[in-house]
Structures are given as structure tokens and as C-alpha cells.
Image: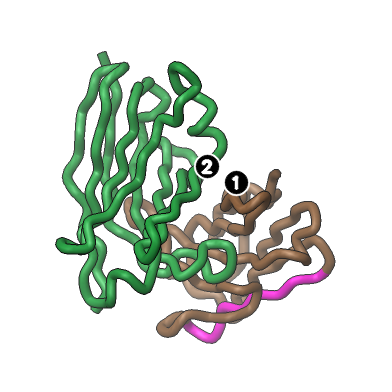
Amino acid sequence: QVQLVQSGAEVKKPGASVNVSCKASGYTFTTYGIGWVRQAPGQGLEYMGWISILNANTNYAQKLQSYALNFQGRVTMTTDTSTTTAYMELRSLRSDDTAVYYCARTANPLVTGFDYWGQGTLVTVSS
Amino acid sequence: YELTQPPSVSVSPGQTASITCSGDKLGDKYTCWYLQKPGQSPVLVIYEDTKRPSGIPERFSGSISGNTATLTIRGTQAMDAADYYCQAWDSRNVVFGGGTKLTVL
């Protein structure tokens, strides 16, 4: 059965970085992409981006790309096909980055959406 | 780009619940729907406007008319109480609606 298992909860200080992993199993890893969605406490779902496993193309949400220091994007999504694991790194953390971060499988998020989700990883940003 | 959903919808058990999602030129895009119960991950219930993933009960259906997508739940059960989110896209970016809390009472 399809499973996405994420890494455990993290507590970070403002300005630090966090790396969340998502281990996929139960399907051919390279035939789907992995998307990342976050949910702040008591709030709705917020799209962060997705990565195609096949060609490593990425699509990052514009909001995250405009936040960072030096006008660089704050988020990087990568995959390791040898371990069928996807990673999401978020840099220059702020208090409003406190959220549950989900990875989710997708054939094409613009068409078929995200059909399997990880259990979520709580990232708390606090001084 | 924004997708507008009603904050809350109430329905009696056994009745039909309808949750709407409106957005500019939504009819030109595909809409997906998710349900999320407290403390759980979202679950895809409708994709490509009207298609139901395997394992999703037939009482869930989706439709699109103009710029409004609708998720309909027929014969609503207590277990259907959840937050429901629509999802579409704009400029190749995924967008989620603000969510609708479905209360079954």
C-alpha cells in the first residue's frame, strides 16, 4: 500500500533552517511527484511547492520565493531516488512558519491533486 | 488568485450537503476537493472536477458550473463532519480555498 512517512517534530529558533523528510513506499517512486503543503495552527492548507521525481523539476509557491533574505527563495525541495525519500528545506525561519508540514503524492497537482499524504511534521519556530 | 468557500455548512444526518468553491475562470481549470478531520491529514475525495478516487464513497460527488465548483454529499453521515478544502491552480501554482467546516447535526 502507498505510504508516505515523514520525519519527526522539530523545534527551531528564528533564522534557522529545517529539513523535513518524506519516505515513500508502495509505488514506483519515479512515476509521481511529491508536493509539500503546510498548515499553521487553526488555519487552512497552504501550498508550498512540488517536485517531479522523474526530472527533478520544481515549482515553488510564489509567496515563499518572495520572503527571503537577499531575494533568494527560502525553500528547496529535493529527492533521493535511491532511498525513495523526498526532502523539504525551509530557511530563514520566522515565527509564522510554525505549522504542520505535509508531503503528498501527486501525478500532476494541477489536474489530479494530491492523492496520498504523509502524517505531517510539526515545526515550531520559537526563540 | 483566491478560491472562496463558505466558512461553515450545516446539514442534518441523511440529508444532502453542498459546499461551493468560487474562483475566477474556475471552469477553465480542474478542481479537487479534500476532507480533513481534526488531527488527521487531508484526504482527496474528488479530482478533475468530478472524479472520485478509489475507496471514496459514492455519496461524494463533484460538479462545476461556470466559475463555481460544488462538492455534494448525499445521505450525509456523522462521520462526514470535517473541514473541506477545494484546490485549483493559477499561473501554474496550486491554490487552496479557505476551507468549509461541515457540521452534521
Residue at image x 53%, y 86%? B58
Answer above or below: position of A113 versus A122.
Answer: below
Q: Position of residue B71 (x, y in %)?
A: 64, 69
Q: Position of residue B9 (x, y in %)?
A: 63, 57
The answer to whether residue A25 is left or right of residue B69 is: left
Q: Which chain corresponds to the colour brown?
A: B
Query: Which residue, given by chain and number where applicable, does mark 2 sit on?
Result: A61
Answer above or below: position of A21 versus B51.
Answer: above
User: In this orientation, which residue lies closer to the viewer: A103 or A120?
Assistant: A103
Task: Please tell me the colour of chain A.
Answer: green
Residue A86 quadrant: bottom left
Closer to the camera: disc 1 or disc 2? 2
Specify the amino acid type for callout 1.
Gly
Q: Quadrant of the N terminus of chain B?
A: top right
Q: Residues within 10 Å of mark 2 (few under 14, many from 20)?
A: many
Q: Chain of mark 1?
A: B
